[in-house]
Amino acid sequence: MQTLQQHLRVAEKDVANLIIKISQMAEPIRNEFTKRRGKADTKNVFGEDQLVLDKWANEFLKEKLKATGMVKMLGSEEEPDIVKFKDGAMFSVTIDPLDGSSNVESNNIVGTIFGIYRDDLPIEGRKQVAALYLLYGPVITLVYSAGNGVHEFLSTPKGFLLKEENIKLPEKGELYSVGGLRKDWIPGMERFVQWMEREGYKLRYGGSFTGDFNQVLQYGGIFVYPALKSKPEGKLRLLFEANPMSFIMEQAGGASSNGKIPILDIKPNSANQRTPLFIGNKDLVKKAEEFLNS
């Protein structure tokens, strides 16, 4: 089985080196799950309650990414502003340090999401040179794309070993995953879900965007966190969640949209911008747009 280092030989050298360094952060994060539990009595920039593990993961990643000497700017869901590291360094990185962290208490799936750019932040997602996520499930997996397809690796005592290369969405999707209360959906969203139910798509929603996205990547379908009556801008963060996963999804043959335009084409007006998100098989993303705009 190919190691992550061997597989990255075809990628740009500097991008490959940064991805390898990020991969080495997975086990230390996972090892803290049993040690750092409970609420931190603080809120993040979005006004959401932080967990002890949220704060620790953010500080850990910030320290480790700075120590690489390769990162000039960091954008994090847990930081109020873009953090500047080293002028002249090669990359800007965005992170969601612990996506779905509320799942830790119930022992469900949690993840970490990274976007990698050469440009300064904030910038549209189309400018990413790579994106990846770590998934802390029954085993730790790493899924990455450096613009050359989507590849999945399993954490083993010998390091990350290739599980599947050049992942492509199944032509016919099976699943749909939808966030937000039904009573808070706009009419077009409700009609779209009713259509999905009539067509026989199976509902899967686990409270972790990374986990739900990974299921769509494996089985096909669509993940949606729409604009809501109470949150017309949506819930998910453009830079930290939507952009990296949209980069990966396009490389797997899928698409993403805010309901009108591709996610990767949105020009952000702030680091903490939110967006509605429709991501998965192209035909389902297009169908969602039709319902929303009819």
Image: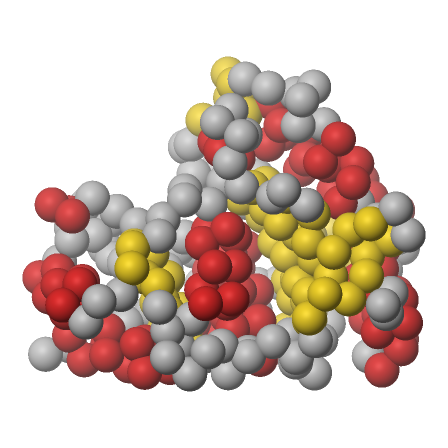
Q: Tell which of 293 and 3 is nearer to you.
A: 3
Q: Tell which of 219 and 269 is nearer to you.
A: 219
Q: Is residue 190 left or right of residue 240?
A: left
Viewer can see residue 143: yes
Q: Quadrant of residue 292?
A: bottom left
Q: Is residue 177 left or right of residue 23?
A: left
Q: How many numbered marks does the figure carry?
A: 0
Q: Tell which of 183 and 117 is nearer to you.
A: 183
Q: Is residue 88 left or right of residue 184?
A: right
Viewer can see residue 272: no
79 vs 2: above or below:
above
Q: For the point 53% across and 30% down, which residue is it?
A: 107
* Residue 293: percent from left, percent from top: 15, 77
Quadrant placement of the N terminus? bottom right
Q: Quadrant of residue 222?
A: bottom left
Q: Which colouring convention does the figure follow? A: secondary structure
* Residue 22: percent from left, percent from top: 79, 53
Quadrant placement of the C terminus? bottom left
51 vs 204: above or below:
above
* Residue 215: percent from left, percent from top: 47, 59
* Residue 198: percent from left, percent from top: 14, 68
Q: For the point 51% across and 66% down, which residue is it?
A: 218
Q: For the point 73% across and 61% down, which residue is it?
A: 153
Q: For the point 49% across and 40% down, which residue is it?
A: 100
